[in-house]
Amino acid sequence: MSKLPLCSLDGKKLGEFDLSDDLLIFDKGLTAMHEAVVAYRTNRRAGTASTLGKGQVAGSNKKPWKQKGTGNARAGYRQSPIWRGGGVAFGPKPRNFSKSVNKKASRLAFKRAFSEKVAAGSIRVLDKFELAEPKTKFAAQVLKQLKVEGRVLLVLDQVDAKTRLATRNLATCEVTSAENVNTYQLLRYPSLLINKAGMEILQKRLQKAGGKKA
């Protein structure tokens, strides 16, 4: 049984949150984690970069000057890539960068990433998370009381409008729901704050992941 620190919003220790070791895995999943992160980052690419080739640049086929007798290097047309304002040689065109990871590998990657965070002691469980008002200063005060340093991922069972408004101006804090948190987010943030209701949802996700030790 793994023990996670349980605390209140003012930073006081309330005890420990018990997490079954059956929900953790350390002997497999590294490759799945890599594939999940690569797919996530790749799928965020727009793929809209586009350049004009020499055949697409506007202009006539008239030679800039005659072939011989001027002392200049011969030139066939002004759309040539070697000319300023000409086409681009081998430039980017719109393309689809998307990659897919099968459901089983994706769940395994999530389980391994979460297990690594548990082993590193990077997770703290909050008894509850409620803000008095949707203001940045209240969210910043909570992080200060919890002595959070650096970037932090706040995982809640439900992200209400008040919490989203209060944290959107905090550059080092990202808020997400336990249902939607992904492998990339787990690996990106050094610290994780999860409320108890969110942990219950995450435990169900980890149970679905399977991948028990042999």
Image (cartoon, grey):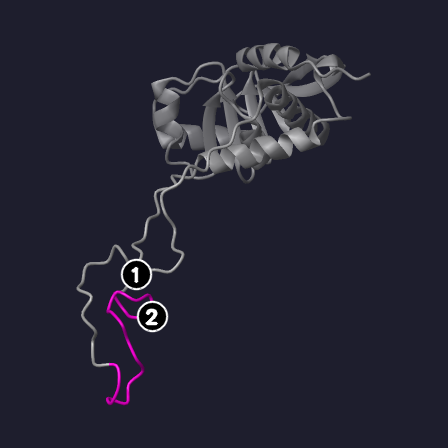
For label 1, the residue is 87
Q: Quadrant of the C terminus?
A: top right
Label of residue 82 in the image: 2
- 29 in relation to 170, above or below: above
Q: Residue at x 44, y 14 (%)?
A: 158
Q: Position of residue 98 (x, y in %)?
A: 46, 33
Q: Position of residue 33 (x, y in %)?
A: 63, 31
- In terms of secondary structure, what is the magenta stretch mainly? loop
CA gap, disc 1 to disc 2? 8 Å
Is the residue marked by circle 1 packed among few (<14), some (14-19), or many (20+) residues within 10 Å? many
Q: Is residue 147 visible?
A: no
Q: Is residue 162 visible?
A: yes
Per the rendered image, the range of residues in magenta is 67-85
Viewer-nearest residue: 11 or 190 = 190
Check if residue 56 falls in the magenta segment. Answer: no
Q: Residue at x 58, y 30 (%)?
A: 36
* Left or right: 28, with 201 as reference point: right
Viewer-nearest residue: 5 or 122 = 122
Viewer-nearest residue: 35 or 120 = 35
- 50 in relation to 24, above or below: below
Q: Residue at x 40, y 30 (%)?
A: 167
Q: Position of residue 52 (x, y in %)?
A: 29, 54
Viewer-nearest residue: 81 or 98 = 81
